[in-house]
Amino acid sequence: MNWTGSTPLAVTGLYTAKELKALQQAGLATAHDILLRLPRRYEDRTRYDGCDALGSGRPVCLKVTVLQTGWRHIPGRRCFEARVRQEGLMPGALLSLKWFHAPYVSRIIAAGHTLAIYGKPGRYGSSYSFINPEFEILENESAGRRLAAESLGEETAPAAPAGAGVRIHTDRLVPVYRGVAGISARRYRAAVFALLQGLDASAGPPGYDVAPAYPYARALRDAHFPDTEDMARKARRRFALDECFRQQFCILWRRRRAAARPGLVTASSSFYVRELAASLPFELTEAQKRCVREIRRDMQSPRPMNRLLQGDVGSGKTLVALCAMLMAVESGYEAALMAPTQILAEQHYCSFRRLLAHMDVRLALRTAARSDDSELSLEGRDDGKPKIVIGTHALLYGKNALARLGLAVIDEQHKFGVEQRGRLIGQGESPDVLVMTATPIPRTLTLTLYGDLDVSVIDELPAARGGVRTVLRSARALPRICAFMQEQMDAGRQIYIVSPLIEESETRRGKAARSEFERWKKQFPEARVGLLHGRLPADEKEAVMRRFHTGELQILVATTVVEVGVDVPNATIMLINDAEGFGLSQLHQLRGRIGRGGHDSYCILLSDARDEAARAKLGALCATPDGFEIAEQDFRLRGPGDVLGTAQSGLGSIRFPEWLSDTRLIHAGKRRAEAVLDADPDLSRPEHAPLRKLVEKGEGGGAVIS
């Protein structure tokens, strides 16, 4: 029987009801779901090891002869055992193969069989034993067919698939997959092989085929059961191009549609900006001035602005955004800034009130817990409505909607969903949009994550800031660290202590903020210590942050809730517990909470990790203060999939993250997307119907391949 990729797995007849339920729980319901779940790696089982490899401590592939089989009772367990002999072993020396929880093996293996086995041997006295090794019968074709049939069901096996005489588990490059609970690795592999045998040769990808020269069905076979690793790489690259094309296509579609829409001219003059700049006790950096000019050019254009503003921590992005908001207000429009947390929204509100105290611009704060309007308006110059509104998700609902929105600023935009961003932007008639991120983005990811946006980069830090020294210390150094902390507090400085958890956990290792709070209160009984984490009620969070900001608290014990936006210039120490458990970019964000005043500051990474990768990561942070270099290091160390995560990617589920770091694939996907839209701008041709469905869903990247 042949099937297409969309065929439900239940129809194939390859699985028991119990297995279908396990696959469904893993999100696998169709042939495509299984076949696009490519192997994690391959094991080379094409060469047989000699008997001298038994003590190597690594998995080995052996050719052995079965001498006897039988059931054995081991205290508390029962196993099927085969005593085998490998050519080259000393006379009388035997190997033991044991299988637990695999009764089907007893119906397959018998004395006299020649087996290929793969596994890691364990030494017990003078003999070696294999526990649950992979195996295949080599004696003749009929035995191979029987094994394939049996391996497709441990209790009840469906009919043997076409091509079952081919060796699947040994004597080849063998695919290794991520596990599915309830299905053995051997069983899963054999079922994938059976699906491939039944796949129609004309089957295509789930959507538009961007690489028809390399048939889809053949590429799937090359990816799962390749003759060489190079063959597997080429096949995987073909699927990565498919995914890259879809993402680039959605970006290009959005960009062209946005360019065709009429927008607002929201920057007719910049008197307010000049007034603000003249009142500051410092001068904007050249990078800030350049970014303001770039934003102003967009706001003067009749097409909607879609611009990303990125910069290192402390580079002054919020001030640039305020300049943009003032230009919108001066042109008669309202401006909104949406922040991901109440703490950050309130901080922006207080900062803007201070900066605009001398100007006739009314501000408002809108969060779930607070709704305040400032008194910043001069009589006769204001209609009483707020012109700049700062808030959280509360801006999206009810009475907080803005009637004349000209500019929407979204801070830490990756923390909002696509629907939330769209809801804010939809309050106006094609308003200008400025999104900000304090996490510097690697160059290649900028092409993919924000390919539909113009990009402004603040690549310069303000002058008159204290330096930040970053050091790696073990728990043994705590007495010296405590003495140094006391010195800093005696000098009037403040301290952050960050832990990965709120409270102790049985499933996660790491220090907890609540227990650390008690510990540091005992360590410094004369100090004023506060606790901040995400589960505190909003009013308590606000009270704690206000006390720390005013200097009433000397030490703030917190989770990563302080990662972004918290600005306390007097804080000079950031102590990070279990630093190895954080990503590089997150550590850099935490470090950015200090060094914001004129005092020298110190970031102390506390870790006893011995893992080389963890030490390399922490060493990279100690070596450079440059957030853009840190982002590139993080990208190289962890890869694009881990760096992005699901929340930050904005791309749906990414199955082939390697294309995110491959500029050749990115440009190839972009060229193909441009060719399609140049030839068929409205996607009216029948062959482009899958692409029309894709863009109508508003999905990109891996949305089709889920």
Image (cartoon, rainbow, N blue to C red):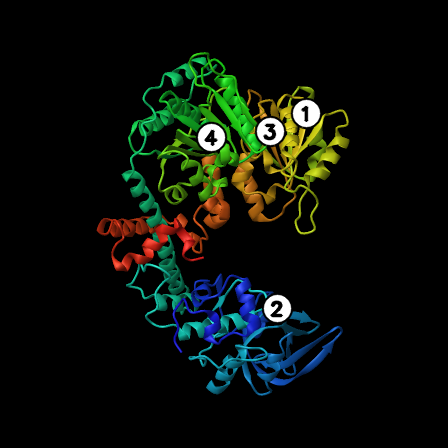
Q: Are marks 1 and 2 in contact (CB under 8 Å)?
A: no
Which residue in the structure is indicated by mark 3? Answer: 602
Give the residue number, with chain letter if any, for mark 1: 553
Q: Which residue is mark 2?
A: 55
State which mark lies toward you, 1 or 3: 1
Sequence-first tag of 1 and 3: 1
Q: Which label's residue is closer to the chain start, 3 or 4?
A: 4
Asked whether the viewer can see residue 622, the reply is no
Q: CA distance from mark 3 to mark 4?
A: 32 Å
Identity of the residue furthest to the left in this view: 679
Q: Residue at x 30, y 51 (%)?
A: 668
Amino acid type, callout 4: Leu
Earlier in the chain: of badge 1 and badge 2, it is: 2
- Kind of residue indicated by mark 2: Gly
Provide residue 338's location: percent of width, then percent of height. Answer: 48, 33
Q: Quadrant of residue 199?
A: bottom left
**Is residue 591 positioned above or below 613 on the image?**
above
Picture quadrant where residue 296 is located: top left
Q: Are circles 1 and 3 on residues that touch, CB within 8 Å?
A: no
Is residue 216 among the parts visible in the rendering?
yes
Q: Is residue 507 above or below residue 346?
A: below
